[in-house]
Image (cartoon, rainbow, N blue to C red):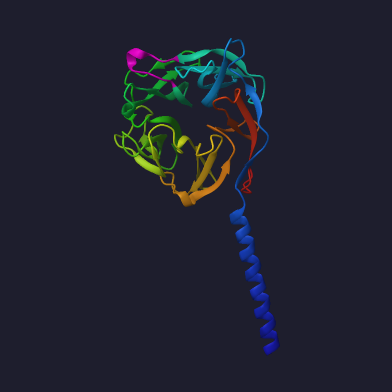
Amino acid sequence: MKRNVLIILIALILFLGSSATGSGQDKDKKPMSIGKFERIFDQSVGEDDVWYMNDHCFIKGPEGKWHMIGITGRDKPKQWAENVLAHAVADSLTGKWEKKPYAMAARNDLNETVLWAPHIIKKGDTYYMYYCGGHPDHRKYQINLATSKDLYKWTRNPGNPLFMEGFDGRDPFIFRDEIKNRWIIYYTATSNPEGGNHLVGARTSTDLIHWSESRTVVFTDPEKGTWGGNTESPVVILRGGWYYLFIGPGANYVTTRVYRSKDLLSWVESDLVTTLEAHAAEIIKNDDGKWYISHCGLERGGLYLAPFFWNDGIKE
């Protein structure tokens, strides 16, 4: 009898040890990975100078084609302006991209000093493009809105700015919260308008035009400063009950850190699940159900795309 009990105890210990090891492996497994980047677009084509692409977005147009709109500027000769938005169109996400005239140019009469990091969503038959318009005072950077029916002709919202943030409040990303029937705009800023901890802020809306007066800080980075920082280019993806926050660039320019939380208004440093080699990354789901990640930046020679793989076991 004692021998049987001993055998059972040993078996139980081995089973629990195996389960613990398995759980550790699952916990340590990166929930996502990326393939090889391929260049899909170069703003320099047809230009005398060398141009770069930076923060951008992808959206399907009313004609069924993919559109890309994003920051562009001159690499050679170096000219820091970023006051126009590049525009390109393709039949497929991975296909040949055709350069189009600028989507929009900054208006000095509206205190727009830059055009940064557009994010576009569609509601009904209208496209809403949120972007940073800058401001002569870096403590009052504008988050603005323009609308369009075709992604070519844009009309600025007469109520711009939607709100102002410092230092250099920018990089808006719109997320639909179906649970509470609201929209959330995520963006990067600092703890004080004059500078401080780099953070990701959020505001809410029910109509995409009027946003909450005060912000909610959803992530705070320990690093302090003014421009730049580690909380740029926020992207939020809901998958399997988890909210994934993608931000960058960190100490390495080509870095995107990924955090995971059950709360779409709260991430902390311990929520970090992986780091990806990409700058100003967008996460896109193609028509065929496959996922992709983009990459760009100063002196990168254009815009790149790579396969993006979820390793969470969830079937599409």
Q: Taking 201 as reference, is 110 above or below it?
A: above
At 63% across and 42% down in the image, what residue appears? 33
Q: Position of residue 242 (x, y in %)?
A: 51, 47
- Does the stretch in magenta take in 47? no
Can residue 289 be seen in this snapshot? Answer: no
Point out the residue furthest to the bottom here. Answer: 1
Point out the residue furthest to the left here. Answer: 213
- The quadrant holding residue 37 is top right
Q: Taking 9 as reference, is 222 above or below it?
A: above
- Does the stretch in magenta take in 111? yes
Q: Is residue 75 left or right of residue 34?
A: left
Q: Position of residue 31 (x, y in %)?
A: 60, 47
- Name the quarter where the C terminus is drawn: top right
Can residue 209 be seen in this snapshot? Answer: yes
At 62% across and 56% down in the image, what residue appears? 26
Viewer-nearest residue: 123 or 27: 27
Magenta residues: mostly which secondary structure?
loop
Viewer-nearest residue: 280 or 63: 280
Q: Position of residue 121 (x, y in %)?
A: 48, 27
- The quadrant holding residue 168 is top left
Point out the residue furthest to the front here. Answer: 77
Q: Position of residue 285 (x, y in %)?
A: 59, 33
What span is in magenta? 105-115
Viewer-nearest residue: 114 or 282: 114
- Name the quarter where the N terminus is drawn: bottom right
